[in-house]
Image (cartoon, helix red, strand yellow):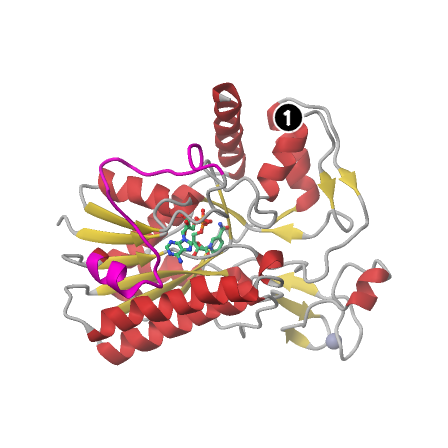
Amino acid sequence: MAKKFLVTGGAGFIGSHLVDRLLEKGHEVRVLDNLDRQAHPDIKKDVFLNPKAEFVKGDVCDKKKVGKALEGVDGVFHFAAAVGVEQSMQELNYYVKNNSLGTSNLLEVLATTDNDVKKIVVASSMSAYGEGLYRCENCGLIEPELRSGEQLKMKKWELYCSVCSKKLVPVPTPETKTQKPNSIYGITKKDQEDMTLLIGKTYGLKAVSMRFFTVIGPRQPPKNPYTGVIKLFLNKIMKNEQPIVFEDGLQSRDFISVHDVVEANILAMMSNAANYESFNVGTGKPVTIMETAEKIALLYGSRIMPKVTQDFRGGDVRHCFPDISKITSKIGWRPKRTFEGTLMEIIEWSNQRVEKN
Ligand SMILES: NC(=O)c1ccc[n+]([C@@H]2O[C@H](COP(=O)([O-])OP(=O)(O)OC[C@H]3O[C@@H](n4cnc5c(N)ncnc54)[C@H](O)[C@@H]3O)[C@@H](O)[C@H]2O)c1
Ligand SMILES: [Zn+2]
Protein backbone atom coordinates (compact mmCIF):
# COMPACT_ATOMS: atom_id res chain seq x y z
CA MET A 1 0.00 0.00 0.00
CA ALA A 2 1.33 3.45 -0.93
CA LYS A 3 2.38 5.59 2.01
CA LYS A 4 3.76 9.03 2.67
CA PHE A 5 7.32 9.27 3.97
CA LEU A 6 9.49 12.08 5.25
CA VAL A 7 13.20 11.72 4.44
CA THR A 8 15.36 14.11 6.46
CA GLY A 9 18.67 14.69 4.71
CA GLY A 10 16.93 13.60 1.49
CA ALA A 11 19.03 15.92 -0.69
CA GLY A 12 22.25 14.17 0.36
CA PHE A 13 24.05 11.12 -0.97
CA ILE A 14 22.18 8.19 0.61
CA GLY A 15 18.94 10.10 1.28
CA SER A 16 18.51 11.10 -2.37
CA HIS A 17 18.86 7.50 -3.57
CA LEU A 18 16.29 6.47 -0.96
CA VAL A 19 13.90 9.18 -2.19
CA ASP A 20 14.25 7.97 -5.79
CA ARG A 21 13.53 4.36 -4.82
CA LEU A 22 10.52 5.22 -2.62
CA LEU A 23 9.02 7.25 -5.49
CA GLU A 24 9.68 4.38 -7.93
CA LYS A 25 7.77 2.10 -5.57
CA GLY A 26 4.77 4.46 -5.75
CA HIS A 27 5.05 6.19 -2.37
CA GLU A 28 4.71 9.91 -1.70
CA VAL A 29 7.86 11.55 -0.40
CA ARG A 30 8.66 14.79 1.37
CA VAL A 31 12.27 15.88 1.96
CA LEU A 32 13.43 18.06 4.85
CA ASP A 33 16.99 19.25 4.26
CA ASN A 34 18.83 22.49 5.03
CA LEU A 35 21.24 22.00 2.08
CA ASP A 36 24.16 22.27 4.46
CA ARG A 37 27.22 23.74 2.70
CA GLN A 38 29.53 20.99 3.86
CA ALA A 39 27.44 18.32 2.16
CA HIS A 40 26.70 20.55 -0.83
CA PRO A 41 29.80 22.65 -1.56
CA ASP A 42 28.49 23.34 -5.05
CA ILE A 43 24.75 23.92 -4.82
CA LYS A 44 24.31 23.49 -8.59
CA LYS A 45 26.06 20.11 -8.80
CA ASP A 46 25.76 18.48 -5.39
CA VAL A 47 22.06 18.71 -4.64
CA PHE A 48 20.04 15.72 -5.77
CA LEU A 49 16.40 16.63 -5.42
CA ASN A 50 13.94 14.41 -7.23
CA PRO A 51 11.33 16.80 -8.74
CA LYS A 52 8.57 14.30 -7.84
CA ALA A 53 9.31 14.73 -4.12
CA GLU A 54 8.04 17.68 -2.13
CA PHE A 55 10.96 19.71 -0.79
CA VAL A 56 10.96 21.62 2.49
CA LYS A 57 14.16 23.59 3.00
CA GLY A 58 14.81 23.65 6.71
CA ASP A 59 16.83 22.50 9.68
CA VAL A 60 15.90 19.48 11.80
CA CYS A 61 16.69 21.69 14.80
CA ASP A 62 13.79 24.01 13.83
CA LYS A 63 10.60 22.85 15.61
CA LYS A 64 8.19 24.71 13.35
CA LYS A 65 9.77 23.38 10.16
CA VAL A 66 9.83 19.85 11.56
CA GLY A 67 6.16 20.10 12.59
CA LYS A 68 5.19 21.22 9.08
CA ALA A 69 7.34 18.56 7.44
CA LEU A 70 5.59 15.84 9.47
CA GLU A 71 2.06 16.74 8.34
CA GLY A 72 0.30 13.72 6.84
CA VAL A 73 3.40 11.53 7.08
CA ASP A 74 3.19 7.80 7.97
CA GLY A 75 6.90 7.12 8.48
CA VAL A 76 10.18 9.01 8.87
CA PHE A 77 13.63 8.10 7.59
CA HIS A 78 15.96 10.26 9.66
CA PHE A 79 19.15 10.66 7.58
CA ALA A 80 20.00 14.33 8.17
CA ALA A 81 23.38 14.61 9.88
CA ALA A 82 26.74 16.27 9.74
CA VAL A 83 29.02 13.51 8.41
CA GLY A 84 32.77 13.21 9.02
CA VAL A 85 35.00 11.69 11.66
CA GLU A 86 38.13 13.86 11.70
CA GLN A 87 36.33 17.18 11.32
CA SER A 88 34.06 16.31 14.24
CA MET A 89 37.10 16.41 16.55
CA GLN A 90 37.48 20.13 15.82
CA GLU A 91 33.92 21.30 15.21
CA LEU A 92 32.28 19.66 18.19
CA ASN A 93 29.34 22.05 18.45
CA TYR A 94 28.46 21.72 14.79
CA TYR A 95 28.25 17.90 15.03
CA VAL A 96 26.42 17.80 18.35
CA LYS A 97 23.94 20.42 17.16
CA ASN A 98 23.08 18.84 13.80
CA ASN A 99 23.13 15.23 14.97
CA SER A 100 22.29 14.96 18.67
CA LEU A 101 20.18 18.12 19.05
CA GLY A 102 18.66 17.67 15.59
CA THR A 103 17.49 14.19 16.57
CA SER A 104 16.22 15.19 20.03
CA ASN A 105 14.27 18.02 18.40
CA LEU A 106 12.69 15.72 15.81
CA LEU A 107 11.82 13.17 18.52
CA GLU A 108 10.37 15.83 20.81
CA VAL A 109 8.04 17.02 18.05
CA LEU A 110 7.10 13.41 17.23
CA ALA A 111 6.43 12.55 20.88
CA THR A 112 4.57 15.66 22.00
CA THR A 113 2.47 16.80 19.03
CA ASP A 114 -0.48 15.36 17.18
CA ASN A 115 0.78 13.45 14.11
CA ASP A 116 0.19 10.27 12.11
CA VAL A 117 3.76 8.98 12.19
CA LYS A 118 3.89 5.31 13.12
CA LYS A 119 7.53 4.49 12.56
CA ILE A 120 11.01 6.01 12.36
CA VAL A 121 14.17 4.52 10.84
CA VAL A 122 17.38 6.29 11.86
CA ALA A 123 20.74 6.19 10.07
CA SER A 124 23.43 5.18 12.54
CA SER A 125 26.99 4.20 11.76
CA MET A 126 29.80 1.72 12.23
CA SER A 127 31.63 4.73 13.73
CA ALA A 128 29.67 4.06 16.92
CA TYR A 129 31.67 0.80 17.39
CA GLY A 130 35.20 2.21 17.31
CA GLU A 131 37.48 -0.78 16.65
CA GLY A 132 35.80 -3.98 15.49
CA LEU A 133 35.71 -7.35 17.26
CA TYR A 134 38.88 -9.50 17.34
CA ARG A 135 39.96 -12.94 18.52
CA CYS A 136 43.07 -13.85 20.50
CA GLU A 137 44.21 -17.43 20.01
CA ASN A 138 44.79 -17.75 23.78
CA CYS A 139 42.19 -15.45 25.35
CA GLY A 140 39.14 -15.67 23.05
CA LEU A 141 37.04 -12.75 21.81
CA ILE A 142 38.42 -9.26 22.49
CA GLU A 143 36.92 -5.78 22.09
CA PRO A 144 40.15 -3.79 21.89
CA GLU A 145 40.73 -0.09 22.36
CA LEU A 146 42.12 1.95 19.47
CA ARG A 147 45.85 1.61 18.82
CA SER A 148 47.86 4.13 20.82
CA GLY A 149 49.85 6.95 19.22
CA GLU A 150 53.02 5.31 20.55
CA GLN A 151 52.23 2.01 18.87
CA LEU A 152 51.49 3.74 15.56
CA LYS A 153 54.75 5.70 15.74
CA MET A 154 56.53 2.32 15.88
CA LYS A 155 54.63 1.35 12.71
CA LYS A 156 53.09 -1.61 14.50
CA TRP A 157 49.86 -1.55 12.54
CA GLU A 158 47.94 -4.60 13.74
CA LEU A 159 46.29 -5.03 17.15
CA TYR A 160 47.79 -7.13 19.95
CA CYS A 161 46.20 -8.80 22.96
CA SER A 162 46.59 -6.67 26.09
CA VAL A 163 46.82 -9.85 28.23
CA CYS A 164 49.17 -12.20 26.32
CA SER A 165 50.51 -9.87 23.56
CA LYS A 166 49.49 -12.26 20.78
CA LYS A 167 48.54 -10.65 17.45
CA LEU A 168 44.75 -10.38 17.20
CA VAL A 169 42.69 -11.67 14.29
CA PRO A 170 39.70 -9.52 13.19
CA VAL A 171 36.33 -11.32 13.21
CA PRO A 172 32.85 -10.14 12.10
CA THR A 173 31.41 -7.51 14.48
CA PRO A 174 27.88 -8.32 15.65
CA GLU A 175 25.38 -5.73 16.90
CA THR A 176 26.03 -6.94 20.46
CA LYS A 177 29.59 -5.61 20.46
CA THR A 178 30.01 -2.75 22.94
CA GLN A 179 29.81 0.59 21.19
CA LYS A 180 33.00 2.51 21.97
CA PRO A 181 32.91 5.47 19.59
CA ASN A 182 36.28 7.09 19.08
CA SER A 183 35.12 10.40 17.61
CA ILE A 184 32.54 13.07 18.34
CA TYR A 185 30.82 12.00 15.12
CA GLY A 186 30.62 8.41 16.44
CA ILE A 187 29.28 9.63 19.79
CA THR A 188 26.54 11.63 18.07
CA LYS A 189 25.56 8.65 15.90
CA LYS A 190 25.25 6.51 19.03
CA ASP A 191 23.20 9.34 20.60
CA GLN A 192 20.92 9.39 17.58
CA GLU A 193 20.20 5.69 17.78
CA ASP A 194 19.90 5.50 21.58
CA MET A 195 17.49 8.44 21.71
CA THR A 196 15.40 7.17 18.79
CA LEU A 197 14.99 3.67 20.27
CA LEU A 198 14.27 4.98 23.78
CA ILE A 199 11.67 7.56 22.72
CA GLY A 200 10.21 5.03 20.29
CA LYS A 201 9.70 2.44 23.05
CA THR A 202 8.43 5.03 25.52
CA TYR A 203 5.79 6.49 23.20
CA GLY A 204 4.92 3.40 21.15
CA LEU A 205 6.49 4.88 18.04
CA LYS A 206 8.05 1.96 16.15
CA ALA A 207 11.77 2.61 15.76
CA VAL A 208 14.76 0.97 14.03
CA SER A 209 18.41 1.95 13.90
CA MET A 210 20.57 1.04 10.94
CA ARG A 211 24.35 0.95 11.41
CA PHE A 212 25.74 1.62 7.95
CA PHE A 213 29.30 0.59 7.13
CA THR A 214 31.17 2.53 4.42
CA VAL A 215 28.52 3.41 1.86
CA ILE A 216 29.63 3.91 -1.75
CA GLY A 217 27.99 4.82 -5.04
CA PRO A 218 27.24 7.69 -7.39
CA ARG A 219 26.60 11.10 -5.74
CA GLN A 220 29.12 10.51 -2.97
CA PRO A 221 30.12 13.79 -1.35
CA PRO A 222 33.42 14.68 -3.03
CA LYS A 223 35.23 16.17 -0.05
CA ASN A 224 34.72 13.77 2.81
CA PRO A 225 37.95 11.77 3.31
CA TYR A 226 36.32 9.09 5.41
CA THR A 227 33.26 8.18 3.45
CA GLY A 228 35.02 9.29 0.29
CA VAL A 229 38.23 7.25 0.14
CA ILE A 230 37.08 5.69 -3.15
CA LYS A 231 36.40 9.11 -4.64
CA LEU A 232 39.76 10.43 -3.42
CA PHE A 233 41.60 7.50 -5.02
CA LEU A 234 39.66 7.88 -8.23
CA ASN A 235 40.29 11.64 -8.41
CA LYS A 236 44.04 10.97 -8.18
CA ILE A 237 43.96 8.16 -10.76
CA MET A 238 41.96 10.36 -13.17
CA LYS A 239 44.76 12.96 -12.92
CA ASN A 240 47.34 10.21 -13.44
CA GLU A 241 48.64 10.68 -9.90
CA GLN A 242 49.35 7.93 -7.37
CA PRO A 243 46.59 7.36 -4.77
CA ILE A 244 47.99 7.87 -1.27
CA VAL A 245 47.61 4.88 1.05
CA PHE A 246 48.27 5.22 4.79
CA GLU A 247 49.89 2.63 7.11
CA ASP A 248 50.90 -0.50 5.16
CA GLY A 249 47.71 -0.53 3.09
CA LEU A 250 46.46 -3.72 4.77
CA GLN A 251 43.85 -1.98 6.93
CA SER A 252 40.42 -3.07 5.78
CA ARG A 253 37.01 -1.51 5.14
CA ASP A 254 33.58 -2.89 4.38
CA PHE A 255 32.19 -1.04 1.35
CA ILE A 256 28.46 -1.38 0.73
CA SER A 257 26.56 -0.16 -2.34
CA VAL A 258 24.18 2.71 -1.70
CA HIS A 259 21.47 0.77 -3.57
CA ASP A 260 21.76 -2.15 -1.14
CA VAL A 261 21.62 0.30 1.79
CA VAL A 262 18.44 1.83 0.37
CA GLU A 263 16.79 -1.61 0.07
CA ALA A 264 17.76 -2.43 3.68
CA ASN A 265 16.13 0.78 4.92
CA ILE A 266 12.90 0.24 3.01
CA LEU A 267 12.69 -3.36 4.29
CA ALA A 268 13.32 -2.13 7.85
CA MET A 269 10.50 0.42 7.50
CA MET A 270 8.05 -2.13 6.09
CA SER A 271 8.86 -5.07 8.37
CA ASN A 272 7.47 -5.40 11.90
CA ALA A 273 10.27 -7.85 12.73
CA ALA A 274 12.63 -4.88 12.60
CA ASN A 275 10.85 -2.86 15.29
CA TYR A 276 13.08 -1.60 18.14
CA GLU A 277 16.15 -3.36 16.72
CA SER A 278 19.59 -2.16 15.60
CA PHE A 279 21.05 -3.69 12.45
CA ASN A 280 24.46 -3.78 10.81
CA VAL A 281 24.23 -2.82 7.14
CA GLY A 282 27.34 -3.89 5.24
CA THR A 283 28.64 -6.76 3.11
CA GLY A 284 30.56 -8.70 5.76
CA LYS A 285 33.33 -9.02 3.17
CA PRO A 286 36.05 -6.49 3.95
CA VAL A 287 38.72 -5.45 1.46
CA THR A 288 42.08 -3.85 2.19
CA ILE A 289 42.70 -0.23 1.29
CA MET A 290 45.58 -1.35 -0.92
CA GLU A 291 43.35 -3.76 -2.85
CA THR A 292 40.77 -1.00 -3.19
CA ALA A 293 43.24 1.45 -4.75
CA GLU A 294 44.58 -1.24 -7.11
CA LYS A 295 41.09 -2.31 -8.16
CA ILE A 296 39.99 1.23 -8.99
CA ALA A 297 43.11 1.79 -11.10
CA LEU A 298 42.56 -1.50 -12.94
CA LEU A 299 38.88 -0.81 -13.63
CA TYR A 300 39.69 2.72 -14.77
CA GLY A 301 42.25 1.29 -17.17
CA SER A 302 45.25 2.91 -15.49
CA ARG A 303 48.57 1.27 -14.66
CA ILE A 304 49.29 3.64 -11.81
CA MET A 305 50.22 2.01 -8.50
CA PRO A 306 49.21 3.32 -5.07
CA LYS A 307 51.83 5.08 -2.95
CA VAL A 308 52.07 3.43 0.47
CA THR A 309 53.26 6.12 2.88
CA GLN A 310 53.65 4.15 6.16
CA ASP A 311 52.16 7.33 7.61
CA PHE A 312 49.08 7.26 9.82
CA ARG A 313 46.12 9.26 11.06
CA GLY A 314 45.47 9.07 14.80
CA GLY A 315 42.01 7.69 15.50
CA ASP A 316 41.80 5.43 12.45
CA VAL A 317 40.27 2.02 12.99
CA ARG A 318 42.34 -0.90 11.65
CA HIS A 319 39.57 -3.41 10.94
CA CYS A 320 35.83 -3.36 11.51
CA PHE A 321 33.48 -5.40 9.35
CA PRO A 322 29.94 -6.47 10.16
CA ASP A 323 28.31 -9.72 11.04
CA ILE A 324 25.14 -9.38 8.96
CA SER A 325 23.38 -12.55 10.09
CA LYS A 326 20.87 -10.61 12.23
CA ILE A 327 19.48 -8.42 9.44
CA THR A 328 19.42 -11.42 7.08
CA SER A 329 17.53 -13.66 9.47
CA LYS A 330 15.13 -10.99 10.84
CA ILE A 331 14.09 -9.15 7.69
CA GLY A 332 15.62 -11.18 4.86
CA TRP A 333 18.04 -8.52 3.61
CA ARG A 334 21.36 -9.36 2.03
CA PRO A 335 23.53 -7.27 -0.27
CA LYS A 336 23.12 -7.97 -3.99
CA ARG A 337 25.68 -5.71 -5.69
CA THR A 338 29.32 -6.62 -6.27
CA PHE A 339 32.22 -4.37 -5.26
CA GLU A 340 33.51 -4.24 -8.84
CA GLY A 341 30.06 -3.36 -10.21
CA THR A 342 29.69 -0.52 -7.73
CA LEU A 343 33.18 0.79 -8.50
CA MET A 344 32.32 0.80 -12.21
CA GLU A 345 29.14 2.72 -11.45
CA ILE A 346 31.17 5.35 -9.55
CA ILE A 347 33.73 5.60 -12.36
CA GLU A 348 30.98 6.14 -14.95
CA TRP A 349 29.31 8.75 -12.79
CA SER A 350 32.61 10.58 -12.26
CA ASN A 351 33.32 10.54 -16.00
CA GLN A 352 29.91 12.10 -16.68
CA ARG A 353 30.58 14.83 -14.14
CA VAL A 354 33.90 15.63 -15.77
CA GLU A 355 32.22 15.83 -19.19
CA LYS A 356 29.61 18.22 -17.81
CA ASN A 357 32.26 20.65 -16.44
N1 LIG B 1 28.13 7.78 3.83
C1 LIG B 1 28.44 6.81 4.70
O1 LIG B 1 29.31 5.98 4.42
C2 LIG B 1 27.70 6.69 6.00
C3 LIG B 1 28.09 5.70 6.89
C4 LIG B 1 27.41 5.55 8.10
C5 LIG B 1 26.34 6.37 8.38
N2 LIG B 1 25.97 7.35 7.51
C6 LIG B 1 24.81 8.19 7.88
O2 LIG B 1 23.88 8.21 6.79
C7 LIG B 1 23.20 9.47 6.76
C8 LIG B 1 23.31 10.09 5.37
O3 LIG B 1 24.68 10.30 5.07
P1 LIG B 1 25.22 10.74 3.65
O4 LIG B 1 26.48 10.01 3.39
O5 LIG B 1 24.11 10.66 2.66
O6 LIG B 1 25.63 12.26 3.94
P2 LIG B 1 25.30 13.62 3.15
O7 LIG B 1 26.13 14.66 3.81
O8 LIG B 1 25.40 13.42 1.68
O9 LIG B 1 23.76 13.87 3.50
C9 LIG B 1 23.32 14.42 4.69
C10 LIG B 1 22.21 15.41 4.34
O10 LIG B 1 21.69 15.96 5.56
C11 LIG B 1 21.52 17.35 5.39
N3 LIG B 1 21.63 17.97 6.73
C12 LIG B 1 22.73 18.06 7.53
N4 LIG B 1 22.40 18.69 8.67
C13 LIG B 1 21.08 19.00 8.60
C14 LIG B 1 20.17 19.66 9.47
N5 LIG B 1 20.56 20.14 10.66
N6 LIG B 1 18.88 19.81 9.07
C15 LIG B 1 18.46 19.35 7.86
N7 LIG B 1 19.28 18.72 6.99
C16 LIG B 1 20.58 18.54 7.36
C17 LIG B 1 22.63 17.80 4.44
O11 LIG B 1 22.32 19.00 3.78
C18 LIG B 1 22.70 16.60 3.49
O12 LIG B 1 21.84 16.78 2.38
C19 LIG B 1 23.83 10.32 7.85
O13 LIG B 1 23.01 10.23 9.00
C20 LIG B 1 25.16 9.65 8.10
O14 LIG B 1 25.64 9.88 9.43
C21 LIG B 1 26.62 7.53 6.33
ZN1 LIG C 1 45.53 -13.02 24.61
Ligand 2: quadrant of the figure: bottom right
Look at the picture and state if 82 lies above or below 257: below
Provide the residue designation for mark 1.
238
137 relative to 185 in the view: left or right = right
- Residue 97: quarter of image: bottom left
Is residue 83 a member of the stretch shown in magenta?
Answer: no
Residue 277 visible? no
**Residue 67: within the magenta?**
yes
Instruction: State the residue lying farthest toward the top.
Output: 355
Magenta region's main secondary structure?
A: loop
The magenta stretch spans which residues? 42-68
Image height of 355 relative to 339, above or below: above
Seen in the picture, residue 199 relative to 237 is either above or below; the reply is below
Residue plotted at (41% across, 46% down): 14
Residue 89, by quadrant, is bottom right
Residue found at x 53% / y 39%: 339
| x and y, in percent, of residue 71 in the image | 16, 58
Image-based side of 300 in relation to 160, left or right: left
**How many other residues sit within 10 Å of disc 1, few (<14), some (14-19) or many (≥20)?**
some
Residue drawn at point x = 80 percent, y = 61 percent: 152
Q: Residue at x 59, y 40 (%)?
A: 230
Going by the image, does 256 lie left or right of 137?
left
Secondary structure state at the residue bearing disc 1 = helix
Q: Nearer the viewer, residue 167 or 81?
A: 81
List x then y, in percent, for residue 336. 41, 42
Whether residue 163 is visible here, answered yes or no, is yes
**149 left or right of 286 in image:** right
Picture coordinates of residue 232, whole percent (x, y): 62, 38
The residue type indicated by label 1 comes to Met
Vertical placement of 51 versus 214: above or below? above
Residue 57: percent from left, percent from top:
31, 49
